[in-house]
Amino acid sequence: MKKLWWLLAIILCLSGAGFVIFGVPNVQNRSASPLPNKPVRIVSLAPNLTEILFALELDEQIVAVSNDSDYPLEAADKKKIGTFWQPNTEAIIACKPDLVVTLQFEQQKAVADTLNRLGYQILTLKIEKVEELLTAIQKIGTATGSRQRADQLINNIRNQMNNLQLKINSTNKVRVLWVVQPEPLRVVGRKTFVNELIELAGGENAIGPTIAQYPQIGTEELLVCGAEIIIQSAMGTGNIGEQQKAAELFWTKWPSLTAVKNNSIYVLEPGTILRLGPRLPQGLMLIARCLHPDIFRYTNNTTQ
């Protein structure tokens, strides 16, 4: 159970990290309109927010980011103010920010509320779906005086996604089993952001409607799901090749599965595919290469 919670925590952190696994309170976006003065000291409390700020060319204004902000490489040079799950209020205040950008979930809400009471300008964003990502980019652009760059970024993301859709619209939907953890076997359900990724990449979730967002399934459910592709997100960014070999060996237990017969098992780098941020088109392309190798040449997932 401890391992499961750790795995789900990684998914949430990477996506937002990007999407919220569990229910969150209804928090209104603050500072969605232009600030009186363009902020010059911005703090980001999540990896995907950091990526958006860098994509909007606000490098010089970013004074601090969450510990888990690892992209782009320049994020490593910024001061750290705690993890995605546990932002350090005192460290944030020490940065003297004129704008703090946060995500909408309980731990960050508590920090945002404290900072708001102290008079700090807060922008809280909900990013659980693709359209919410584009809305968040627009709101960040408005709040930081970067609306034109935000519009350009949104158009670029939309264009790349549209180009991908044009290539896969005529193909049959591929049944995808997306594995959260192999033992015990837990998979991605349909009421998740990952399911949206599967569908955008021209696939269909092999798992039908479930109560749990990330249900645990047994051998019987596995054998009847009809999975043509199996995808696992790698644990971390290192040794993906070794994780790929381990996954292929693990799935030999079920040789009757179409995905196993065809050796259609893929372990993908997690940051690009699970983080709802500016790299969304690249993540979708990585998935599409797995689902449609006849259309997209599959390459090692560690390269872009």
Image: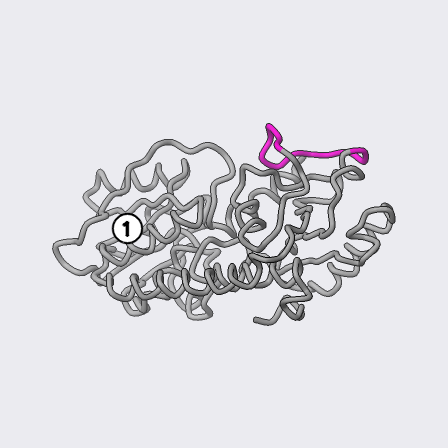
Q: Quadrant of the C terminus?
A: bottom right
Q: Residue shown at 65%/70% (left/top)?
A: 297
**x and y percent of residue 204 in the render?**
62, 46
Label 1 amino acid?
A: Ile
Q: Nearer the viewer, residue 181 or 189?
A: 189
Give the quadrant of residue 192.
top right
Tally the marks: 1
Residue 211 within the segment the image draws in magenta: yes
Classify residue 211 as left or right of residue 128: right
Q: Main secondary structure of the magenta part?
A: loop
Q: Residue furthest front?
A: 170
Residue that label 1 marks: 93
In terms of secondary structure, where does tag 1 sit? helix
Q: Residue furthest left?
A: 36
**x and y percent of residue 269 in the render?**
61, 60
Classify residue 174 as left or right of residue 226: left
Q: Residue shown at 61%/38% (left/top)?
A: 189
Which color scheme does this rendered protein use? one colour
Q: Quadrant of the N terminus?
A: top right
Q: Residue shown at 46%/49% (left/top)?
A: 18
Q: Nearer the viewer, residue 263 or 9?
A: 263
Classify residue 237 as left or right of residue 229: left
Residue 112 within the segment the image draws in magenta: no
Q: Residue shown at 32%/48% (left/top)?
A: 90
Q: Residues within 10 Å of mark 1 (few under 14, many from 20)?
A: some
Relative vertical location of residue 126 with respect to residue 170 in this rendering, above or below? above
The region drawn magenta spans 209-220
**x and y percent of residue 127 in the render?**
40, 46
Q: Nearer the viewer, residue 21 or 79?
A: 21
Give the quadrant of residue 40.
bottom left
Relative vertical location of residue 192 with respect to residue 34 in this rendering, above or below? above
